[in-house]
Amino acid sequence: MTLPSDLLSRIEAVHSDDTKDFKQLARAAALDPDSDFRGVCLKGIDLASCDLSAFDFYESDLREKNFSNATIRQSALRGGR
């Protein structure tokens, strides 16, 4: 299977980024925090101390997540698990 070049470049950008910061990795992957995280499974992800104020996790699975010291809008969590 051959990956589209734009997808491959996004994967390479995330892989080459030394950070573990969720926001920076999303930016490296050219993901839109206002729409690309709706209805996705992020079960068990560590989001501690992240600035998630621009993210919309509408109807996303965030069970077993870690939001310790994270900045997040409550409205961004509506409809999720």
Image (cartoon, rainbow, N blue to C red):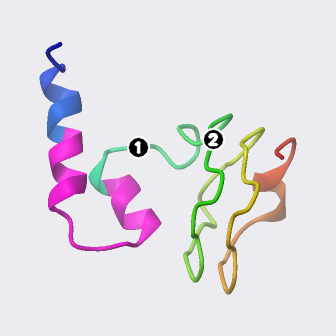
Amino acid carrying mark 2 in the image: Cys
Residue at the spot 40% in from the left edge and 54% down from the top edge: 26
Q: Quadrant of residue 14?
A: bottom left
Q: Judging from the image, what secondary structure is the residue with disc 2 in?
A: loop
* Image-based side of 9 in relation to 66, left or right: left
* Image-based side of 69 in relation to 24, left or right: right
Most common secondary structure along the magenta stretch: helix
| Tag 2–tag 1 contact (CB < 8 Å) | no
Q: Residues within 10 Å of mark 2 (few under 14, many from 20)?
A: some
Note whether 48 is above or below 75 in the view shown: below
> Which mark is on residue 31?
1
Residue 11 within the magenta-colored segment of the rendering:
yes
Q: Judging from the image, what secondary structure is the residue with disc 1 in?
A: loop
Residue 70 horizontal/vertical position (percent): 65, 79
Image quadrant in which the N terminus is located? top left
The CA distance from mark 2 to mark 1 is: 15 Å
Amino acid carrying mark 1 in the image: Leu
Residue 67 horizontal/vertical position (percent): 69, 74
> Which mark is on residue 8?
none
Q: What is the span of residues highlighted in magenta in the rendered image?
A: 10-27
Residue at the spot 63% in from the left edge and 67% down from the top edge: 53
Residue 74 horizontal/vertical position (percent): 83, 63
| Residue marked by disc 2 | 41
Between disc 2 and disc 1, the foreground one is 2
Pointer 2 or 1: first along the chain: 1
Residue 30 within the magenta-colored segment of the rendering:
no
Q: Quadrant of residue 58?
A: top right
Which one is nearer the viewer's eye here, 17 or 53?
17
Q: Quadrant of residue 39?
A: top right
